[in-house]
Image (spheres, helix red, strand yellow):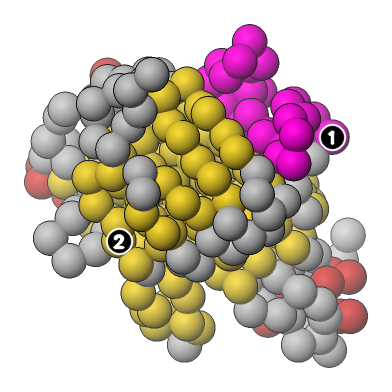
Amino acid sequence: MSHRSIHKIIPAKLINMGGHLLDQPLPYDGVEQIDPFLLIHHWNQPIEGGLRPQEAGVGPHPHRGFSPVTFIFKGDIQHRDSLGNNAIVEEGGTQWMHAGKGITHSERPSKVLAQNGGEHEFIQFWVNTPAKFKMEPAYYLPISKEDTPTIKKEKAEISVVTGEFENVKGPAKTYSPQTHLRINTEASAKLSLELESNFNTILYLLDGELLIDNKTVKDKDLVWFANDAANIEITSTKESRFIILSGEPINEEVVSYGPFVMNSQVEIMQAMRDSQMGKMGILIEDFNE
């Protein structure tokens, strides 16, 4: 059986976000997006403890035109938004948000994690939305580890967050065809994954070591596959944690500015005006819950 080859391996680079260092494999030098995926941030820094939650994480900010998605690997994240949602998602869970025409949200550690401290690791990635759905109403879906269907294989576990994989359907709703997987393997696991050959497919390795297409993939490498077959062959040479994001290309112009992703500069200017006028909602956080 033929299998997908690797188009490119992109090592994540350390970037400074508001005084915090995190790993960013996308965008990368000369690679603005791998349609429909726009950005991947990998955060892995412990919370010191002795904090109030309002002193940690990211305070209220707006979004429009895409889905910011967060996979939590260690610790937790508390999401609050202008629609009235308030949820804590813990290790193994996913914060799924479609910004649509506009939403204001915050992302912070829970009060317990902020006070007591502890490990804190997550990946946030941005998925573009087709133009015809960019102004849909926003929605938010917290998905716990227990609510994420998992396929158990020899020496591997595959959690399906979106799309359909091996007759298992993920709970998150997407606006273009996609499959998102979270995978844990023991050393010497062998996987054969069938994904749509016309979908752009990327793999990001949090830690461990993989052998793919006769190439060694190391910690914090992003693998960008060629669209030359449906089957992906993976051997884990060490215990490994990785994600796979696979999506049908949208093939539309992308114009972004900060937290807004639209199709033209005019739409970006409108998004900025709408945000300033409060049309993306107001979030006043209550830390006395």
Numbered tag placed on residue 146 in the rendering: 1
Secondary structure, mark 2, is strand
Label 2 Cα neighbours within 10 Å, binned few <14 / some 14-19 / many ≥20: many
Q: Nearer the viewer, residue 42 or 128?
A: 42
Residue 224 image offset from top left, x and y in percent: 30, 46
Instruction: Work out whether 267 lies above or below 276.
Output: above
Label 1 Cα neighbours within 10 Å, binned few <14 / some 14-19 / many ≥20: few
Q: Is residue 162 magenta?
A: yes
Instruction: Work out whether 58 lies above or below 196.
Output: below
Q: Is residue 147 magenta?
A: yes
Q: Is residue 138 left or right of residue 148?
A: left
Instruction: Work out whether 241 lies above or below 93.
Output: below
Q: Residue at x 74, y 41 (%)?
A: 155
Nearest to N terminus: mark 2 or mark 1? 2
Q: Nearer the viewer, residue 121 or 202?
A: 202
Q: Residue at x 16, y 46 (%)?
A: 255
Q: Is residue 29 left or right of residue 50?
A: left
Q: Is residue 170 left or right of residue 37?
A: right
Q: Residue at x 24, y 29 (%)?
A: 227
Q: Which residues are magenta?
A: 146-174
What amino acid is found at the position of numbered circle 1 in the picture?
Glu
Residue 240 image offset from top left, x and y in percent: 63, 56
Instruction: Work out whether 137 lies above or below 93.
Output: above
Q: Which residue is mark 2?
A: 10
Query: Dividing the picture into quarters, in which one does residue 45 lie?
Result: bottom right
| Residue 121 in view (yes/no) | yes
Secondary structure, mark 1, is loop
